[in-house]
Image: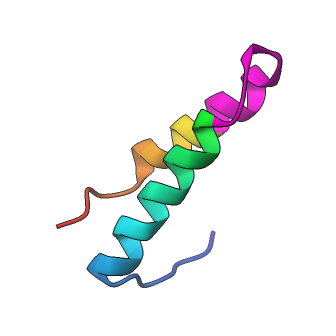
Amino acid sequence: MQTIELSDDDLRLLHAALHSYLDDFGHEEADVLRRVKALLAKLPRPA
């Protein structure tokens, strides 16, 4: 397990980047979609 510290701006950028990444995939990458969604669910909401 790794721990990283993110500022509020870093967290907002990470959320935006993951959502953009998620939007680029189609149905044939269902495993990637599940993993990205799981990662997003672990992140706290940006302030």
Is 3 magenta? The answer is no
Location of residue 39 with respect to 16 vertically, above or below: above
Is 31 magenta? The answer is yes
Residue at the location (40% across, 82% down)?
6
Is residue 31 left or right of 24 when viewed as pictured?
Answer: right
Furthest residue in direction top, as rendered: 27
Percent from the top left, x then y, of residue 10?
40, 78
Is residue 13 left or right of 29 when viewed as pictured?
Answer: left
Percent from the top left, x then y, of residue 22?
60, 38
Q: Quadrant of residue 15?
A: bottom left
Furthest residue in direction right, as rendered: 28
Percent from the top left, x then y, of residue 4?
50, 81
Q: Quadrant of residue 33?
A: top right
Q: Quadrant of the N terminus?
A: bottom right
Percent from the top left, x then y, of residue 39?
54, 47
Location of residue 40 with respect to 14 vertically, above or below: above
Residue at the location (68% across, 36% down)?
24
Q: How is the image coloured?
A: rainbow
**How many numbered marks, from 0 up?**
0
Magenta part of the chain: 24-35
Q: Quadrant of the C terminus?
A: bottom left
**Main secondary structure type of the part rendered in magenta:** helix
Location of residue 31 with respect to 46 vertically, above or below: above
Location of residue 32 with respect to 15 vertically, above or below: above
